[in-house]
Image (cartoon, grey):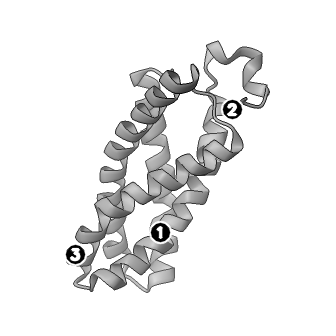
Amino acid sequence: MRSTRDRLRHAILFELLGLALIIPLGSLLFGLHGSDMGVIGVGSALAATVWNYVYNLGFDRAMQRLVGHTRKSLGLRVGHALLFEAGLLVILLPPIAWYLGISLRQAFVMDLAIAAFYVAYAFTFNLAYDRVFPLKNWGDAAAQPAR
């Protein structure tokens, strides 16, 4: 299982790179001023960083208990990313609607678009992170499909 230090590195790298991508892309897509998208992006990143740590720790502990390891297959990676984003969507919806002065429905559509970006981004980032920073106890098993 990953250490607290490794989990913090993961969360910080994930959010910094995500912000570098989502602020300019979100401004263009939603027609928002960069500062408004920046507030949404930074606020979301702070909430997501805490959620990222809590969610991944709980997910890995559950995997360790249920299957005895934390290696994630391709299918499990997809489910992992989708569940993470669903939880974050519930957390972020009210603050986005309030800050922009829009309806929950409008915020939901915006949040879905952002979540769709982050699902693809989370999948790609986590796959790359596991390859760049593999756990020593994975050994050759990391290259093998999970059973």
| Residue 146 pos. (x, y %) | 72, 30
Type of the residue with mark 1: Ile
| Residue 34 pos. (x, y %) | 38, 75
Instruction: Specify the label residue 99 is tagged with.
Output: 3
| Above or below 88: residue 5 | above
Mark 2 or mark 1: whose residue is earlier in sequence = 1
Using a 10 Å C-alpha cutoff, classify the residue at mark 2 as few (fewer than 14 neighbours), some (14 to 19) or many (20 or more): few
Mark 3 or mark 2: whose residue is earlier in sequence = 3
Rendering quarter of residue 72: top right
Rendering quarter of residue 131: top right
User: Relative to the observer, which residue lies in front, 67 or 8?
Assistant: 67
Type of the residue with mark 3: Tyr
Instruction: Specify the label residue 131 is tagged with.
Output: 2
Instruction: State the CA–CA distance, disc 3 to disc 2.
Output: 38 Å
Helix, strand or loop at label 1? It is: helix
Instruction: Residue at 38% x, 37% y: name it.
Output: 53
| Residue 31 placement, left or right of 124 | left
**Which residue does the numbered mark 1 point to in the structure image?**
114
| Residue 19 pos. (x, y %) | 45, 58
